[in-house]
Image: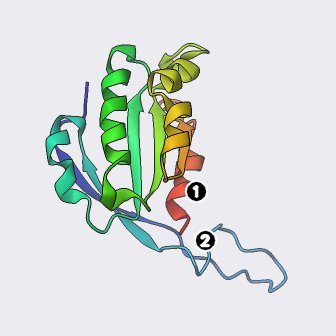
Amino acid sequence: MPTIGTGIYSIHFPEKQKPSNPNAPTTTTASKHLPKSIQVLEIGGSMAPLWRQYFEDIKKLIYVVDASNLCQISAAGVLFYSILTEPRLQKVKILLVLTKMDYSYRQMRNEALLMLQMSKLQKQIRQQVQIVEASAVTKVGFPEIYDWLQRP
């Protein structure tokens, strides 16, 4: 079931903490080159016809696919392709998140990527797409998503 509606969130990253011992390493991975916070605009799949009006000034895009629902993966692939071909998004960094991997069986990732035609797409598109498996239940993939968000 696609996300319904929209949401705007701010994510604040921890600042680098100064160690009491100057020779000790810092306690976080943040650096002066990384953003201190980012704004996330969530626009659910049911609002796909409106997506185009939000494509200005986008630097990063996270596209989430429910990998536990094979019936919707092909439809998600069509929408994903329409995003990849959008002229205003040719320089955007893209993270493809395959969610609900805890509900999936071992080959689900490969089947999802096959249904999304990722090997074919990656040969044809300009954008670099990073793929992450994630689960809200087991927290698998969260560190990778968090790191991707912090990269410039």
Task: Give the amino acid at mark 1.
Answer: Asp
Residue 136 visible in image: no
- Count of picture labels: 2
In the orientation shown, which residue stands out farthest toward the right? 23
**Left or right, 41 with reference to 49:** right
**Residue 151 x/y as whole percent:** 56, 65
Q: Which residue is mark 2?
A: 30
**Left or right, 50 with reference to 109:** left
In the orientation shown, which residue stands out farthest toward the front? 124
Of residues 75 and 86, the one nearer the viewer is 86
Question: Residues under labels 1 and 2: Cα distance?
Answer: 10 Å
Q: Quadrant of residue 92?
A: bottom left
Of residues 4 and 18, the one nearer the viewer is 4
Residue 97 marker: none
Of residues 21 and 84, the one nearer the viewer is 84
**Residue 85 x/y as whole percent:** 35, 47
Badge nearest the viewer, 1 or 2:
1
**Residue 12 x/y as whole percent:** 43, 67
- Residue at image coords 72%, 74%: 26
- Residue at image coords 54%, 41%: 122
Q: Which residue is mark 1?
A: 147
Residue 82 visible in image: yes
**Left or right, 132 with reference to 78:** right
Of residues 11 and 60, the one nearer the viewer is 60
Task: Give the amino acid at mark 2.
Answer: Ala
Q: How crowded is the residue under tag 1: few (<14 C-alpha within 10 Å), some, or many (20+)?
A: few
Q: Is residue 92 shown above or below 111?
A: below
